[in-house]
Image (cartoon, helix red, strand yellow):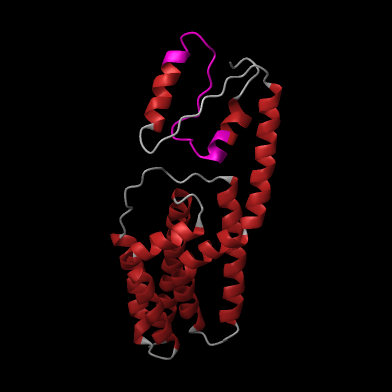
């Protein structure tokens, strides 16, 4: 491969590869959020949707082949990334991604892990290592986010415990407050809205918004919206 063509392929591959990796990060962190940050649940989801990761394996294979000396594969690798960008379709999702503090902490940890991976690969020295690096980063992005989430478990537990204790103190300060919990397998959110519509005719009522039915969703509602005037 001539040097100008090599440089063009390198620039296209790196640029498109980084964009694809960024899009993959957004998609994976979104799925992790929808899976309530449970790494076990998310890994099972990944296994159930293993075909969605076929392109990751193709890119890694092409990057490895290019690295060991088959220069023509550089063109293929750059084409793969560009084709993925042009043909990519966003799947329908139940809820949009919310960049919460937890998401930002996971992304920070994943970036640190990716930095270690980058340094390890760059130690291999040859120019073709940039193609290999692009393929490796793209391939391992889903696993890096799962690992980052796992590493952050102690931190997230401490943060949650702080919020829970704070919510408990707020509840204690609201004397005479009547708390109603709705349980069941189906229809909890609908019943919640019906009950809220009935009670607010006579009382000052606070309801968890939308489907904030998890412990931390309730804690967030208490900390952000509960007032002394609520009954």
Work out which residue is located at the far left of the displayed protein and give it.
87
Q: Position of residue 134 (x, y in %)?
A: 47, 73
Q: Position of residue 223 (x, y in %)?
A: 63, 31
Q: Nearer the viewer, residue 42 or 58?
A: 42
Residue at image point 38% right, 90% down: 70
Residue at image point 59% right, 26% down: 225
Q: Nearer the viewer, residue 220 or 96?
A: 220
Q: Nearer the viewer, residue 75 or 62?
A: 62
Side of 179 relative to 72 (left or right): right
Work out which residue is located at the far front of the displayed protein and give it.
184
In the picture shown, does residue 186 fall above or below 35?
above
Q: Which of the image's four quarters has the C terminus?
A: top right
Q: Which of the image's four quarters has the N terminus?
A: bottom left
Q: Which residues are magenta?
A: 198-218
Asked where in the image residue 76 lies, by quadrant, the reply is: bottom left
Residue 214 part of the magenta segment: yes
Work out which residue is located at the far bottom of the displayed protein and give it.
69
Q: Nearer the viewer, residue 98 or 163?
A: 163
Q: Position of residue 104 (x, y in %)?
A: 58, 51
In the picture shown, does residue 117 fall above or below 25?
below
Q: Position of residue 41 (x, y in %)?
A: 45, 57
Q: Is residue 177 visible?
A: yes
Count of all numbered marks drawn on residues in the image: 0
Query: Principal SS element in the magenta part?
Result: loop
Q: Is residue 4 visible?
A: no
In the picture shown, does residue 200 fall above or below 173?
above
Asked where in the image residue 67 lies, by quadrant, the reply is: bottom left
């Amino acid at each position: 491969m001539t040097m100008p063509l090599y440089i063009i392929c390198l620039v296209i591959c790196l640029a498109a590869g980084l964009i694809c990796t960024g899009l993959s990060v957004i998609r994976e962190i979104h799925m992790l959020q929808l899976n309530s940050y449970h790494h076990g649940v998310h890994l099972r989801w990944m296994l159930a949707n293993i075909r969605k990761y076929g392109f990751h394996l193709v890119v890694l294979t092409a990057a490895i082949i290019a690295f060991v000396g088959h220069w023509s594969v550089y063109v293929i690798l750059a084409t793969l990334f560009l084709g993925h960008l042009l043909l990519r379709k966003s799947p329908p999702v139940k809820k949009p991604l919310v960049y919460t503090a937890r998401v930002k902490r996971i992304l920070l940890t994943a970036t640190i892990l990716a930095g270690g991976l980058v340094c390890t690969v760059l130690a291999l020295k040859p120019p073709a290592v940039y193609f290999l690096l692009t393929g490796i980063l793209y391939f391992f992005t889903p696993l890096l986010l799962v690992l980052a989430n796992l590493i952050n478990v102690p931190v997230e537990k401490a943060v949650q415990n702080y919020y829970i204790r704070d919510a408990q103190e707020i509840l204690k300060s609201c004397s005479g407050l009547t708390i109603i919990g709705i349980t069941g397998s189906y229809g909890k959110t609908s019943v919640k809205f019906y009950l809220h519509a009935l009670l607010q005719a006579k009382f000052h009522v606070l309801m968890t918004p939308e489907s904030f039915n998890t412990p931390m969703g309730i804690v967030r509602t208490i900390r952000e919206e509960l007032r002394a005037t609520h009954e």
